[in-house]
Amino acid sequence: MRQDHLISAHQLTREDVEAVLDRASEIAADPAAFRTRRAGEVLALCFFEPSTRTKMSFDTAMKRLGGDTVDMGTVESSSITKGETLADTVRVIEGYADAIVLRHPSEGAAKMAAEFVDVPLVNAGDGAGQHPTQTLLDLFTIRENHGLDDITIGVMGDLKYGRTVHSLAHALTNFDARQHFVSPESLRLPRSVRYDLHEAGAQVREHTDLEEILPELDVLYVTRIQRERFPDENEYRAVAGQYRIDAETLEAASDELTVMHPLPRVDEIAPEVDETAHARYFEQAHNGIPVRMALLDTLL
């Protein structure tokens, strides 16, 4: 990769994506060969928002490369409660680690923080903005099941606040992918994201009903309606539960359909779907290890 930091999927060229995914494939095939690659190096985990998969997979990835991690801990237990700025926080932590992974509730926080440090900084999610490492493991999962060219992808759920959606949609413009977006009117893609996709030459179609496009999809990427992103509780209640996948829904799908979800899920995918051949969301989560190992190894 040509960047010192990974802040947005907009940075990723097709060559960047393929380089990281190819290395992830090598790691998945022979993880023992990478056990000492980053011995003696330290990754700082700075999570200002809750996380399970992203935080634990970065922790595991660094340790499986032979390195170690230091964890800032919760915001409540840090100097943030004393009024310390994000800029000062990352400048201090830079002295303790060889790279930083940052999750923050404010969109643009990772971009700003990266201006104050010289070690690689990876955006692990900034509000409703971007989540580029989730995108890389999503692309790895899609590639393993279908390849990344001449595919049709449907993305359903919270498209307005979903940072995983924004990152994935832009990254897919590097490939021959037809993108369909399914959501209630109130959760459509933001105008700025739609503009960026059209400028990048994406084939984008928006829908309010999944049934009309389900049979033609190779991949259905389902997202949670994110209660924590809504400024108005009434707005959340009006759309919560509207878009749900169950075994009956998938009767109209292709036998080869792959169902994905960045997790956590609430009720948008029924547990019965877990037992079908379509379900790939737990495999998707597990792919975070080799992909984040590959990314860290590349940046370091």
Image (cartoon, rainbow, N blue to C red):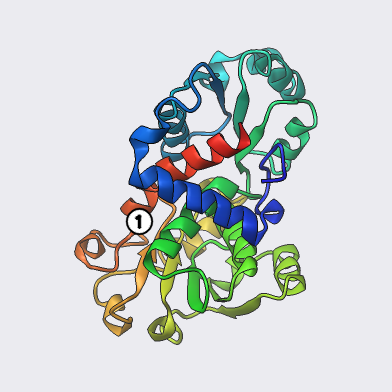
Asked if 232 appears above or below 155 in the picture, the reply is above
Q: Position of residue 130 (x, y in %)?
A: 63, 49
Nearest the eye: 83 or 259: 259
Can I make out residue 162 in this image? no
Q: Position of residue 252 (x, y in %)?
A: 31, 84
Q: Quadrant of residue 267?
A: bottom left
Which quarter of the figure has residue 203? Answer: bottom right
Which residue shows up at 47% across the image and 36% down it?
51
Query: Which residue corresponds to mark 1?
Result: 281
Residue 237 appearing in the image: yes
Residue 110 location in percent, x, y?
A: 70, 37
Seen from the viewer's position, the closer of residues 166 and 35 is 35
For image coordinates 49% across by 53% down, the residue present is 22
Position of 184 with respect to 26 (left or right) is right
Q: Quadrant of the C terminus?
A: top right
284 or 213, nearer to the observer? 284
Q: Residue at x 32, y 76 (%)?
A: 256
* Residue 171 occupies quadrant: bottom right
| Residue at image coords 39%, 28% | 35
User: So how many labels did they put on this image?
Assistant: 1
Q: Is 62 placed left or right of 295 in the picture?
A: left
Badge 1 marks a residue whose secondary structure is helix
Q: Is residue 143 above or below residue 180?
A: above
Amino acid at circle 1 = Tyr
- 121 relative to 235, above or below: above
